[in-house]
Amino acid sequence: MKTKAVRIYGKKDLRLEEFELPEMKDDEILAEIITNSICMSTHKAANQGAEHKRVPDDIAVNPTMVGHEFCGIILDVGKKWADKFKKGDKFSIQPALNYKGSLDAPGYSYRWIGGNATHVLIPNEVMEMDCLLPYEGEAFFMGSLSEPVSCIVGTYHAMYHIPQGTYQHNMGIVEGGNMAILAGVGPMGLGAIDYALHNDRRPGLLVVTDIDNARLARAAELYTVEHAAEQGVKLVYLNTGTASDPVAALMAYTDDKGYDDVLVMAPVRPVVEQGDKILGKDGCLNFFAGPSNTDFSAMLNFYDVHYAAHHLVGTSGGNTSDMRESLEMMERGALNPAAMITHIGGMNAVIDTILNLPNIPGGKKLMYTHKEFPLTAIADFAEAGKENPVFTELDAIVKRNNGLWCLDAEQYLLANI
């Protein structure tokens, strides 16, 4: 079967090509990709080429497909897996296989599987490691977002607390406790708010900060104080940029007791240090944001590490269990990660989007691999409609959905472009 895919040949050398896939083996699965969301990790791999830990050394002669946040449909199943998977099933994939200790992952390491493709061959090890994940939801874009959402889920599960006088690590946030999400209204921050409000274990107080009033206002439209109260959570949005003493302002919401759980969503030294200062006794700070600077550091109060039992964790990605939880919560409508998506594009826009990702504002860039149209911000649909009337209707659809990408928009795009 022919496929069209973006493959990496070297540093910043990405090529959109059409070629034949090998014949499917008995232990493989043939699949069609519908959506792939672009991850900063793919940008890093494109910049590093074969120097990236997951990218093979011989990509100049054996290029690999890029993209690992994808969702699609199973087309054919090899004999080995016929009792577990069937044609027509939707799926997502956990790319971190950890197969026999290897770092190999779909979207980095394999010639015949990656998200920026029309058709792929899923190798045996994906199924062996239980990383081919059934998805029963309707919207393909939700399946693509299960991987980034799993990073958020994993963050919450990685938090821990130690009852005084014990060595027992109680995993997860403090139920009914004080929680802060700092620099928390970017795309992943919005997802963290969504999970905090709709997970089974919720904080009693959730303070979300940023220094941009427009972004805070948008977050407050998506996740209202009133809705949070219905979930048993007191939700506060705070612009720390306008506060004369941000730490004091944050502490005031806790009657100066401090926060049990703090997520730091930006690799900014003052934000990390602010998070450290607002921790309460046995407080846990999770440094969620992945810095590109290998020398990034910040000051922490080690007096409080010793006497107030402050502790620090960092998470990078989620595991397969986290992805399953993400998919299950999306399937039943408990999570809606659509707020992460700010742009959509076709296969022809993939390469430029990957290479220029840090310079493109907004959140997730969602690509429809069987379509060809330029990368377009949801906020610009009305303007894009002057050139392509499909975007005029898409603009109307998302405006009816509070400005968010949605199933109706996806189905209209798939039928009309």
Image (cartoon, grey):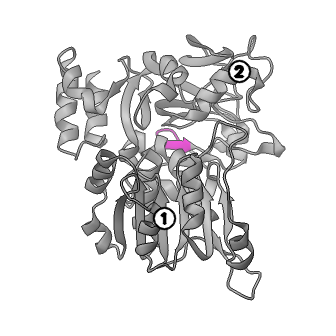
Q: Judging from the image, what secondary structure is the residue with disc 1 in?
A: helix
Q: Give me the disc on residue 109.
A: none
Would you say 324 lies left or right of 61 here?
left
Task: Give the position of the C terminus as an image quadrant.
Answer: top left
Residue situated in front as seen by the camera: 230 or 323: 230
- On the rendered image, what quadrant is the N terminus found in? top right
**Among all residues in the image, which is located at the extreme bottom?**
165
Q: Earlier in the sequence, mark 2 or mark 1?
A: 2
Q: Vertically, is 197 above or below 387?
A: below
Q: Can you identify the residue that label 1 sits on?
A: 247
Label 2 packing within 10 angstroms: few (<14), some (14-19), many (20+): many
Residue 16 visible in the displayed image: yes
* Left or right relative to 381: residue 364: right
Figure check: 234 above or below 150: below
Please state which of residues 332 and 393 is positioned toward the viewer in this rendering. 393
Does the magenta-highlighted stretch encompass residue 88? Answer: yes
Instruction: Count the labels in the image.
Output: 2
Residue 223 image point, x, y percent: 31, 58
* Magenta part of the chain: 86-92
* Residue drawn at the location 59% of the way across and 55% of the way down: 272
Mark carried by residue 49: 2
Q: Quadrant of residue 34?
A: top left
Q: Amino acid at mark 2?
A: Gly
Amino acid type, residue under disc 1 in the picture:
Val
Question: Residue at position x 64%, y 54% from top?
Answer: 315
Magenta stretch contains residue 377: no
Dot 1 crowding, Cα within 10 Å, few <14, some 14–19, many 20+? some
Residue 26 sits above or below residue 319 on the image: above
x then y, percent, for residue 141: 41, 40
**Residue at (33% x, 46% y) in the render:** 215
Q: CA distance from mark 2 to mark 1?
A: 42 Å
